[in-house]
Every structure is written in C-alpha cells, then in structure tokens.
Amino acid sequence: MPAIYGFFGDPMIIAVDEAVPYWKEAFSDLGTLRPYSAKELRPADVRDADILIVRTVTPVNAPLLEGSLVRFVGAASAGTDHIDQEYLKARGIHFSYAAGCNANSVSEYIVTALHIIASRKGWNLKNKSLAVVGVGNVGSRVAKKARALGMDVLLCDPPLRDSTGDAQYRLLDDVLGADILSFHVPLAFAGPYPTWHMVNRRFLDRLSPEQFLLNSSRGPIFDSREVKAALLESRIGGVVIDVWEEEPRIDYSLLELADVGTPHIAGNALDGKIQATEMIRDALFAHFKIIPSQRLNPVYPADQVLRAAPEKDPQTSVLSVLLQAFDLQKQDADLRTLQDAATETAAEGFERLRTRKPLRPEFRHFIVDLDKRHIHLADTFAALGFGIKGTGIAE
C-alpha cells in the first residue's frame, strides 16, 4: 500500500499515542510513525506532523496544534470532551472519533455492577425497574441486557425523543420513580438538555432513600458534593461510580461512601480498544480516499471456559460467572487502597489502575459450561454475550 504524502512530498508523519492498541500494524504502511506518550506530548512533537492519533487524555486544542501541519485528528475513543472541535473546524482540520467503540464493554460493566449490588442488598433484579438515561450506543445495550435479566426498563432520552418523535424515549421527570437510574449521556454544558451536574441537589431531593444511581458516562454529570451529602444523609440508597469529577484527583471521601467505585475502567475492554483503532484507521483511509489492501488482524485471547457456582439462586450463579469474566470487585478494592495516599501519589495510582494491562476481554471470549442444574440459565448467559455449552444444550 503506498504511503500518504505530506505537503513537501515526503511520506506523512503520523504522531500516534503509543497506548493505542496495534498502532504499528494499523498505521505503519501509511507514512512515518512518531509514537509518543500522552503524558509527555508537547506542541513541538506535532509541529511537523500531518496526522495526530490520540486517545482519551490528550487535550487537542490551539495550544497543542497552532502552527502545526496537522490536517487530520483521530481520537481512538468514544468521547470527545478533550477535543476542541470548533478550533479544528476553524482550522480546516478533519476530525474523527470512535463513537460506540466501547459501548458493549460498558454495558457488561453495568450488568456486573447490578449483580454485585443485588447480591449485597438482597434484591431480585426481576423485581426492579431500571431507568436508562441516555439511549445511545451504550444505553441501548444496557437496556437490552437489563430486559434479558427480566428488569422493567424505562428509556430516557429527550434529544432522541425530539429528533424521532418516539414517545418511548421519556423525559427525565417521567423516569424519576425507577428503582435504579443508570446514566449514559454525553457531557453538555449548554443547549436545551445540559448534562453538567444534572444530578444536583434539586434532582437528588426528588429521589427516595431506596433509589440507586450508576454513573459510567462522564464524571461531571454528578455534582460530587451534593451526591456525597445525599449519601451521608441517607437520602438515596447508594451509588456505583466509574467516572469522577477532577480525574485523576478524585474525591476519596465520596469513594468511601460509594457501593462500588472504579477508576474509569468501564469501557476498558480489549475488544473496544481494538475496535477504536480499526474505526480511526477506516476513517483515515476514507478521508484520504485510500482503499485498504487488508484488514487489521488483531489477536484475541483464546476462549476460556467458565462454570457457574452450584447455587440454588439463579442470580447468584450468574454473578459467579460474571466475576470470573470481569472481577469488578477487585477493581473497586484496588482503587480503595489509594484512599490514604498523598494527592499526587493517589492521582498517579488512579492513572495506573485505569491504564494497566492486560485489558480484559469481553464476555464473548468466554464459554459458560452449564450442567443440568443451570441449564435454565442458557438464554440469560447468551443474552449477556457469553458462549454456551453443556449437558442438554442441544436437546
């Protein structure tokens, strides 16, 4: 495949975050690669670059790009909070990001968290209602999995209601009675439906001590101070928090009150990261009108066989498999070890926990071996994304 050429007739320089999976395989035949560490990136590092590939932690704005040759920015991430899109548009710099790349990973996080909380609280999830606030790539998958668990699912997405006219997408006021509210919205500071601090004092005052909140979207969706006060005063039942205000310098006093707290890892599955790389590679090819000669061929781990614990309660058996595939409780415990550390030490520890490898594989890389006691759970595991085998499956 021929390289893409820059302004001066030389092969393009592609500055790429070395944390992007398969960056060499994805971009090496398009030009000269210049890998960088996001923590150490400086404007001088991209001044003569034609293409910039980032992940989630690199602010892409005028201070970084002014005076550079960059004409394509690709964010191998599902979010764009770190990208000054107005600046890129004004400079004529093409921008692409990997919308939805980690949607399934986040939905698997939510399913696992729900089972952990249900186990601790003695809930039967089939008797609980779940409001999915934001029904995009992530929220739609959460809703589908929750319905497979037998939950009563309410969909809340006012912008989608406006654009489609579909009344199934309710207003926020219409879902405030749900037992559990899970947030999957972008961060918006203005417009008809701002989401910055949407979970504020006024919002929390309308809830009851039995209701539960989950945030795996953006940290500033929650007003941390008000959520902490609501927990201290037992005005809400509890929270699961994966994303935090002021990351990586998070409020560990809020973590202490959270039922589950994790270091922004809900979307950190291997599959989503690889898909993000593939999506940016495809966007780059499309923008420069190049036909790829071959697909990226990532190597996934071999499928693992899991077995459900011999519990009479089906929900407990499901949880036993979920924790084998994704030990969310360990992620929570690891973050809590930083509570007594100095601020900067804790911030560095948060980043290590967030970015450490190996990345977890999604549920599709696991096969649940069901015996006769658990054969009735086959449909549930399949709906959650697992492969299935075992006695009686084909009968």
Image (cartoon, rainbow, N blue to C red):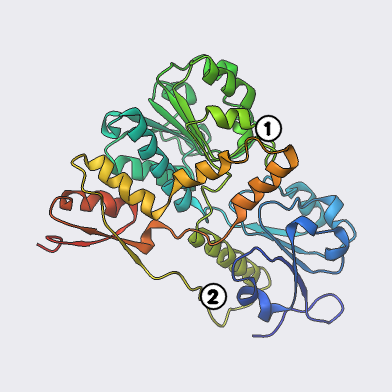
Q: Which residue is mark 1?
A: 189
Residue 171 position, x and y percent, is: 47, 26
Quadrant position of the C terminus in the picture:
bottom left
Q: Which of pointers 1 and 2 indicates the residue nearer the eye?
A: 2
User: Circle 2 sits in a helix, a strand or a loop, which is it?
Assistant: loop
Cα gap from disc 1 to disc 2, whole angstroms: 37 Å
Secondary structure at badge 1 equals loop
Residue pointed to by mark 2: 296
Quarter of the rendering occupied by the N terminus: bottom right
Image height of 149 relative to 368, above or below: above
In the shown orientation, is residue 192 left or right of residue 324?
A: right
Quarter assignment of residue 145 = top left
Q: Can you give x and y, in whole percent of width and height, for residue 156 in the image?
A: 45, 32
Name the kind of residue labelled 2 in the image: Leu
Q: Residue 92: which quarter of the image?
A: bottom right
Q: Considering only order in the chain, which callout, 2 or 1, is on the residue closer to the N terminus?
A: 1
Q: How many labels, in total?
A: 2
The residue under the point 16% across, 53% down is: 375
Type of amino acid at the residue the image marks with label 1: Phe
Say if residue 20 shows up in the picture.
Answer: yes
- Please say if the residues under marks 1 and 2 sit with CB atoms less than 8 Å apart: no
